Image: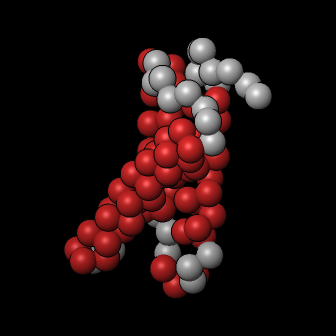
Amino acid sequence: MSRPASTRARLRGAFVGAASGTVSIAAHAIGGGTVTLGHSATALLLGGCAIAGALATTLRTRRGPVPLPVLLVFGQVIGHSALAAAPGHQLG
């Protein structure tokens, strides 16, 4: 991978990871969920977003734009699940 392509891949991965975490927290708060980040919720949120970002880094851009939104959705689902599984989260 050439240096500019490598830089673009890393930026794409960082964007997917950061956007997944940010949108997960914002959507959870807007939906009325409590956003109290304990140790377990933070670890799950960061881990899920890091995995989504790492997968986005490995994407080949020749496949088209479809895999990127899929990874954004994956990261948000993982992030929301981490926040919903946090201690003190109330359902309903």
Q: Position of residue 51 (x, y in %)?
A: 50, 46
Q: Position of residue 24 (x, y in %)?
A: 53, 45
Looking at this view, name the residue that lies furthest to the right.
92
Quadrant in which the N terminus is drawn:
bottom left
Q: Is residue 49 visible?
A: no
Residue nearer the viewer, 32 or 65? 32
- The answer to whether 44 is drawn above or below residue 24 in the figure is above
Display coloring:
secondary structure
Q: Quadrant of residue 15?
A: bottom left
Looking at this view, name the residue that lies furthest to the top.
88
Q: Position of residue 34 (x, y in %)?
A: 56, 27
Residue occupying the point 55% across, 59% down: 72
Looking at this view, name the residue that lies furthest to the left.
3
Residue occupying the point 39% across, 51% down: 18
Q: Is residue 77 visible?
A: yes
Q: Position of residue 4 (x, y in %)?
A: 24, 77
- The answer to whether 42 is drawn above or below residue 24 in the figure is above
Residue occupying the point 51% across, 20% down: 40
Residue occupying the point 61% across, 36% down: 32
Is 53 left, or right, of 76 in this rendering? left
Q: How many marks?
A: 0
- The answer to whether 74 is drawn above or below residue 33 in the figure is below
Quadrant in which the C terminus is drawn:
top right
